[in-house]
Amino acid sequence: MTTPAATEPHAVVIVGGGQAGLATAFYLLRAGVDVLVLDDQDGPGGAWRHVWPSMTLFSTADFSNLPGILMPAHNGFPPADHVIDYLAAYERRYAIPVERPVRVDRVESTGRALGEGRFLLRAGDRSWTADHVVAATGTWASPFVPRLPGTFSGRQWHSANYPGVEPFRGTRVAVVGGANSAAQIAAELTEVADVTWYTRREPQWMPDDVDGRVLFQRNRERMLAILRGGEDPGADSLLGDIVMLPEVLAARDSGRLHATPMFTSLDELEQVSIDHLIWCTGFRPALGPIRALLKDRTPTVDGLHLVGYGDWVGPGSATITGVGPYAKAAARAIAESYGKTVR
């Protein structure tokens, strides 16, 4: 008979060791608050460990920083391995206590008061108590695929598990989606495959000179306006849906990348002999462990905080350079409950 592991008490447990979790831990540790990060990955990097080989940031390294140390310089837009190295160095620099791989199965409210362990977190036969829980699980683990009638005998993929161009050489590929991932994947596949790019409307291209720096500035303006109680100046989508990375721009301007009206049934793909179907249809918040403690996207118990998740939490909160204010706000609320200050 196996003896269950002892329950470990902490002031704060952060679920998720990607950019949102690390930024929140940075502020909490600096305020002198006990914190533990539980991460389900095998190493640092969060979702960046799983992106496709050619995926890069939309902004340069000097505009892609968490609070604290800067991302090292890189010529052009940094690729995934550069981001992963930065996040690993960030953990080391600030001695962030991360346990991995730990997959949290569920988070329960104990009904206890502050200082007595408001929450119980379970991962297999291990458990932790915490006064505060920060959900920083992101979206990558929850890819969205729409339901359509009909059948498709080819292989289906999602941008979450798209492996790069090699499996698609010399084949017929359908790419579905009207935003960045679809445009980037379709663009690079046009070099090696017969690609049909399906969208619900004509592609909404952003101006050629818009990159992550411009988007960050817009998101910061939105955040400040919302915090002031003013009028929201509008989301990035007012500029368009697709950032014109060099590869996307080249594919569009050469005529290789053009959209086809969305099919209404999977049977239509069978009729044109498509070999692969790649869904670039986005993600939903990966809230499995805490879903029972939410109602209409809002925590139903004190001490539960959400950081990241894009516009669901706030403008720019799903980006490396934009998550800082939201991480700081969550950390400040937590620190104040212990009479501590976040600076």
Image: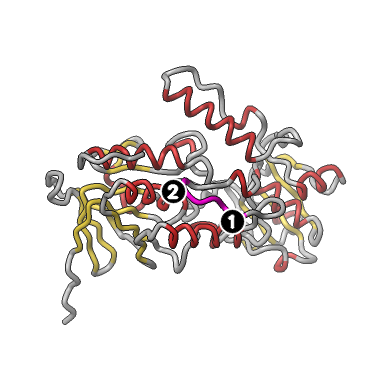
User: Which of these two is toward me, 247 or 143?
Assistant: 247
Q: Position of residue 340 (x, y in %)?
A: 24, 41
Q: Earlier in the sequence, mark 2 or mark 1?
A: 2
**Range drawn in magenta:** 67-72
Q: Report the number of numbered marks.
A: 2
Q: Residue furthest top?
A: 230
* Res 328 → quadrant: top left
Q: Position of residue 150 (x, y in %)?
A: 60, 51
Q: Is residue 70 magenta?
A: yes
**Left or right of 240, for residue 192:** right
User: Which of these two is toward me, 151 or 52?
Assistant: 52
Quadrant housing the N terminus: bottom left
Q: Nearer the viewer, mark 2 or mark 1?
A: 2
For disc 2, the neighbor class at 10 Å (few under 14, some 14 to 19, many from 20) is many
Residue 20: mark? 2
Relative to 264, say whether 201 is above or below: above
* Res 125 → quadrant: bottom left
For disc 1, the neighbor class at 10 Å (few under 14, some 14 to 19, many from 20) is some
The kind of residue tagged 2 is: Ala
The kind of residue tagged 1 is: His
Q: Residue furthest bottom?
A: 1
Quadrant housing the C terminus: top left
Residue at label 1?
158
Q: How is the image coloured?
A: secondary structure
Q: Position of residue 54 (x, y in %)?
A: 68, 58
- Residue at point 63% right, 38% down? 213
